[in-house]
Image (cartoon, helix red, strand yellow):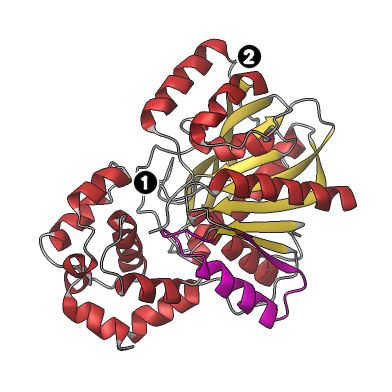
Amino acid sequence: MFHCFRTSGTLILMLSSLLLITACEKDGNEELDINSCNPVGLPGELLEANYTLTFNPAQIEPYLSAFGAPAFLDLEYSVDAYSVSYMTLNKNEELTRVSGVMFIPRDIDTLDLISVQHGTVIKRDQVGSVTPWYSLDGLIVAMNGYLVIAPDYLGLGDSQILHPFLHAKLSANPVIDFIRATRVYACENEIILSDNLFLVGYSEGGFVSLATQKIIEAEYSDEIQLTGVAPMAGPHDLSWSTNDLLNRHTYNNPAYLAYIVVAYNDIYEWNRISEIFQEPYASLIPGLYDGNHEGSEINNQLTNAVDQLFLPEFRTSFLAGEEAQIESTLVENSALGWGPIAPVRLIHGTSDSTVLYENSVNAYNSLRDNGGVSVDLIALPGTDHESAAFLAYFLAIEWFDSLRTAQ
């Protein structure tokens, strides 16, 4: 449903092998010594931060065209990558270990912080804390001169639970707590962070970024102040999106359709998989989301025909407005119906068939109608979900540069 900004497994392995040989070396395996800066026993507690690799622009630039990057995308700084583990809250409000990757550019005295939220991942180890190349978006942003953190999210990387796909609060928790853990790291290592703090993400990451802003400004505004947020190609209007998808004849990523049902079924304890999906898919689906399968593998086990994947009685009842529990849950988790304080720049390709452009139009209208101080929508004409990704990131970085220059 909500495709990701991702690289192929083969290319990941090739590039990772190359960098293990050619990346700049640091002395030893750096680990953080925990002391008074760290909020032990609280969300945001930093458990460890281990150096993995150093990347420089000369290593990255030859491969950018293979990922579809525009020719005008310039990279300036060498970057040290760290695999980070920290504490956040799970669905039961209990502390749990999660992970992410941190990229620190070299030769900058005062660093602006950006949290980069990745697109949809289903296989647990395909995240930046395991292999930094899985956070190519974060790496590119860091090479433009930002300290970048990219959370793996709950259910991915270190976390062994089911990923709470497109759940607003459980998506925001690891972002907020990675910001806290990064401030701990900066305190312990005498890194100077500026007051600038940005959020950006594509696809699921766009949804997570906007949801995180909503929660920060509602609950943590005394602790965290945002400078700018760029939610890109995200499924911001979950109710509208679900209605659209269930009205379709086919959808090319059925793994994403099932992902949100499996996640919500777990979080809210619905026990309704057999009431929503047809056989043989209803029996297959729970086992496909154990963290060991890629989206392409799951797609091959399911069907692109929406009317064959979902039970006809479920589709009929939902589209008739008779699934009040599910509808209210979708509305609750959509990042609509509020007025953001920090500037928001939505970016979306107009020909996106994976996450329709109307998601960003609906978000734009809702945020402005509810008193958003500075909300913009940048349309990328004729681009789809894949072709818009690099251009969207370029435009987001350019906008962030203008905001930090102004400050």
Nearer to us in this view, 197 or 318: 318
Q: Position of residue 107 (x, y in %)?
A: 80, 25
Nearer to us in this view, 59 or 89: 59
Tell me if 3 is positioned left or right of 293 in this view: right
Q: Which residues are magenta?
A: 350-379
> Given the image, on which type of amino acid does mark 1 rest?
Gln
Nearer to us in this view, 399 or 85: 399
Q: Is residue 367 magenta?
A: yes
Tell me if 232 is positioned left or right of 344 in this view: left
Residues at circles 2 and 1 in contact by the CB criterion of under 8 Å = no
Residue at the spot x=60%, y=19% of the render? Answer: 59
346 is higher (above) or lower (below) than 196: below
Q: Earlier in the sequence, mark 2 or mark 1?
A: 2
Provide the residue designation for mark 1.
Answer: 160
* Residue 343 in view, yes or no: yes
> Given the image, on which type of amino acid does mark 2 rest?
Cys
Q: How many marks?
A: 2
Provide the residue designation for mark 2.
Answer: 24
* Residue 30 in view, yes or no: no
Q: Quadrant of residue 318?
A: bottom left
Q: What kind of element bears circle 2?
A: loop
Residue at the spot x=27%, y=48% of the render? Answer: 290
Name the disc covering residue 343, or none: none
Nearer to us in this view, 95 or 369: 369
Q: Nearer the viewer, mark 2 or mark 1?
A: 2
Q: Position of residue 293 (x, y in %)?
A: 28, 43
Q: Position of residue 372 (x, y in %)?
A: 72, 75
